[in-house]
Image: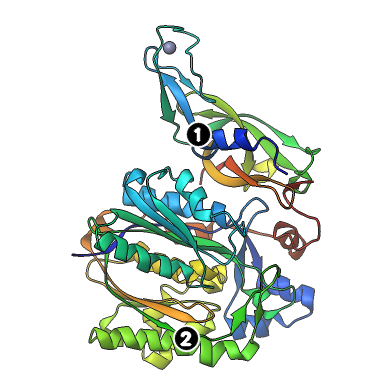
């Protein structure tokens, strides 16, 4: 039985801040940072946007694209490291807002930046075993970087939602494979506002090791090699890491550029790999092969082999990512700090 | 502390999905929902209907002195939206500057945070509108 993507939806906020504006405030050399991280600007959520609102927007777009009755969704999983509540699921808010309630199961996932792909794997199992007809898997975040920290140049907001099923597929998922270890490269303790990271430790033993092992692992398992793929998309903590990983594995630059969105929207954390995949699907044609590999600190990678079907050409996504990327308004650092609640006491909140 | 928790919970279908009602006898649609048609009275036939979320700006005003809790959103616009199905409703207009607004411009539904009840209360979500792309 086939399993794959019936529809998908994206959402990123309208506001942007440029790398040079952040660098200006902290007295850093913006050219250096832009080149080192390959980042030009990132999205900024409005004061009334959070992971729940972003999840709802992309989930509604996915339901619209899939042209399904939302009551046929049997499971909703929202992967994020910025759920609005510590206790109270984001997934129930999404379930009500897409009108999938009440006959379904729902839960929130957490695994740094790969919680969204973990949600896809779970729903694949549920639809394939016929426990449910459709599953809705979401990766969304409004991530935070400590002011002045290197992560502040990339940590952004956005999300993507995928309807997983077994019929009317716009893309078939041939296989999935994961590589997981206990690696302390990035963490946030309960009650802490900002995450901590192991600086240089986040590169070699963390991101590269897991992404490369997962990519090679799934290719070996399926007897495929880099030139069997038209596109490859990796988790994108910055613009540089995925390019370097692709090169190490043996992909050409043209295979990875289509899905490389971080330079223009920043690192959307749980949304990152899924938004890159959506960007590829927006224009992909029948028979094209995609390798997608997420990465979540802590650490693990989920890899997917995806083949685009004819249905994707017949049923193009009405709200492609490029439209959201082009629709933007720049804010200065002060406005960004206000929107992100970085100024003490500034919140959309009753006293 | 969250006052009106039960009311908020009951209004979730309205606030998230613009669920109203319509009278099958005379065709009039209502938002917020009415349980009795004012035209047909006892012979009216009321059923639930979900509005599309598409409409236009019928009128709007810019808020410079917001109520408590909304201070950091100012200035923001509140619009009277005429839904394409007929009913009018009042909602905030987001992702725009007051000077972008004009009566008659097309708008569409978005899902946003309305307000949080203090730092330990519930977060209320609901409908707002933005200019159609
Ligand atoms: Zn009537």
Do tag 2 and tag 1 residues touch (Cβ < 8 Å)? no
Residue A279 in sight: no
Identify residue for label 2. A181
Dot 2: chain letter: A
Question: Where does residue A170 sit, x and y in percent of width and height?
Answer: 27, 60
- Residue drawn at x 58%, y 87% is A202
Q: Viewed as shown, does residue A161 lie left or right of A153?
A: left
Question: Where does residue B69 sit, x and y in percent of width and height?
Answer: 76, 44
A98 to A187, vertically: above or below:
above
Question: Where does residue B29 sit, x and y in percent of width and height?
Answer: 46, 21
User: Which of the 4 quarters of the picture holds residue A315?
Assistant: bottom left
Identify the element where label 2 is drawn: loop
User: Which of the 4 quarters of the picture holds residue B28?
Assistant: top left
- Residue drawn at x 61%, y 86% is A36
Q: Residues within 10 Å of mark 2 (few under 14, many from 20)?
A: few
Q: How crowded is mark 1: few (under 14 residues within 10 Å), some or many (20 or more)?
A: many
Q: Which of marks 2 and 1 is in front?
A: 2
Identify residue for label 1. B18
């Amino acid at each position: 039985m086939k399993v794959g993507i019936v529809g998908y939806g994206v959402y990123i906020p309208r506001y942007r801040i440029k790398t040079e504006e952040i660098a200006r405030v902290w007295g850093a050399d913006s050219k250096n940072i832009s080149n080192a991280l390959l980042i030009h600007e990132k999205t900024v959520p409005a004061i009334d946007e959070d992971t729940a609102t972003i999840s709802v927007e992309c989930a509604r777009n996915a339901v619209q694209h899939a042209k399904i009755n939302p009551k046929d969704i049997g499971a909703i999983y929202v992967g994020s490291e910025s759920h609005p509540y510590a206790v109270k699921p984001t997934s129930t808010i999404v379930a009500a807002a897409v009108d999938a309630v009440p006959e379904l199961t729902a839960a929130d996932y957490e695994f740094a930046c790969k919680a969204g792909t973990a949600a896809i794997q779970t729903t694949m199992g549920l639809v394939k075993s016929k426990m449910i007809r459709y599953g809705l898997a979401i990766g969304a975040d409004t991530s935070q970087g400590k002011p002045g920290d290197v992560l502040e140049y990339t940590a952004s907001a956005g999300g993507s939602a995928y309807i997983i099923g077994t019929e009317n597929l716009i893309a078939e998922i041939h296989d999935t494979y994961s590589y997981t270890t206990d690696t302390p490269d990035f963490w946030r303790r309960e009650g802490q506002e900002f995450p901590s990271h192991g600086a240089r430790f986040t590169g070699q033993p963390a991101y590269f090791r897991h992404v490369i092992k997962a990519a090679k692992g799934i290719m070996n398992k399926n007897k495929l090699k880099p030139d069997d793929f038209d596109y490859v998309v990796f988790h994108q903590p910055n613009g540089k890491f995925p390019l370097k990983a692709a090169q190490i594995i043996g992909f050409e630059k043209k295979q990875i550029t289509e899905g490389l969105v971080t330079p223009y929207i920043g690192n959307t954390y749980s949304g990152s790999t899924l938004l890159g995949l959506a960007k590829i699907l927006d224009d992909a044609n029948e028979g094209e092969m995609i390798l997608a590999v997420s990465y979540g600190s802590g650490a693990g990678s989920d890899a997917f082999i995806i083949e685009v079907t004819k249905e994707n050409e017949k049923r193009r996504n009405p709200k492609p990512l490029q439209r959201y990327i082009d629709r933007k308004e720049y804010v200065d650092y002060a406005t960004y700090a206000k929107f992100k609640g970085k100024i003490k006491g500034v919140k959309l909140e009753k006293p | 502390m969250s006052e009106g928790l039960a009311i908020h919970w009951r209004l979730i279908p309205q606030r998230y999905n613009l669920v109203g009602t319509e009278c099958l006898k005379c065709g009039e649609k209502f938002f917020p929902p009415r349980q009795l048609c004012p035209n047909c009275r006892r012979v009216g036939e009321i059923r639930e209907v979900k509005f599309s979320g598409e409409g236009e700006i019928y009128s709007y005003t810019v808020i410079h002195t917001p109520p408590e809790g909304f201070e950091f959103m100012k200035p923001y616009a509140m619009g009277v939206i005429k839904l394409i199905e007929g009913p009018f409703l009042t909602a905030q207009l987001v992702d725009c500057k007051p000077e972008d607004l004009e009566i008659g411009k097309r708008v569409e539904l978005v899902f946003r945070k309305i307000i949080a009840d203090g730092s330990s209360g519930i977060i209320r979500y609901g409908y707002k509108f933005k200019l159609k792309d």
